[in-house]
Image (cartoon, helix red, strand yellow):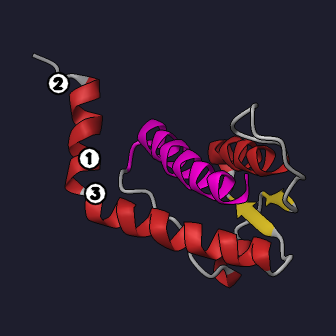
Amino acid sequence: MKENNFLKRSKIIEKNQVYLTEAVQTLTHLSMKAIYQEGKLIFADIGGSAAEVEDMSADYLGTLVISNKRNPFPSSEKKESRVYEKSFFAFKAISSMKAIIQELQTIVGHKICSIVLKEFS
């Protein structure tokens, strides 16, 4: 019998919950620090995940929660790997399956965004 895809994903998340929690905490801290210092958030990736970084950037320029009214945070997306080399922290996906990588990027990215937006709302 084929393994349930939802169960497979939940096992990956459970197995890596310490890393995912630390990634959220680190990236949240760095994001808020950049915003407080009037810096810019830069999201980078290549390939299919480039659409994910565009989405994350849009969430900061706009808002993830429509009822929150605030000025946009400076944000941009880059689709080149050189940014990765200069970043303070890189979220490394914990799967070799592209679909799961993109899903985890979305989960982690939206969690960070919701914490940051709550701080500034």
Instruction: For marks 2 and 1, give the CA distance.
Output: 13 Å
Instruction: List x then y, in percent, for residue 36.
Output: 77, 76
Mark 3 or 1 closer to N-term?
A: 1
Indicate the position of residue 68 as horizontal and vertical percent values.
76, 40
Where is mark 1, residue-wise?
A: 12
Q: Is residue 38 magenta?
A: no
The residues bearing labels 3 and 1 have C-alpha atoms spaced at a distance of 8 Å
Marks 1 and 2: in contact by CB < 8 Å? no
The residue shown at (71%, 61%) is 44
**Residue 118 in magenta?**
yes
Q: From the viewer's perspective, is 35 left or right of 15?
A: right
The residue that mark 3 highlights is 17
Disc 3 is placed on an element classified as: helix
The CA span between labels 3 and 2 is 21 Å
x and y percentages locating residue 117 in the rendered image: 68, 52
Q: Nearer the viewer, mark 2 or mark 1?
A: 1
Q: Position of residue 76 (x, y in %)?
A: 84, 59
Which amino acid type is marked by label 2?
Glu
For the point 81% across and 81% down, the residue is: 37
User: Crowding near pointer 2: few (<14 within 10 Å), some, many (20+)?
Assistant: few
For the stretch drawn in magenta, the main secondary structure is helix
- Residue 106: name its quadrant: top right
User: Which residue has dot 2 on it?
Assistant: 3
State which tag comes first along the sequence, 3 or 2: 2
Crowding around mark 3 (Cα neighbors within 10 Å: few <14, some 14 to 19, many 20+) is: few
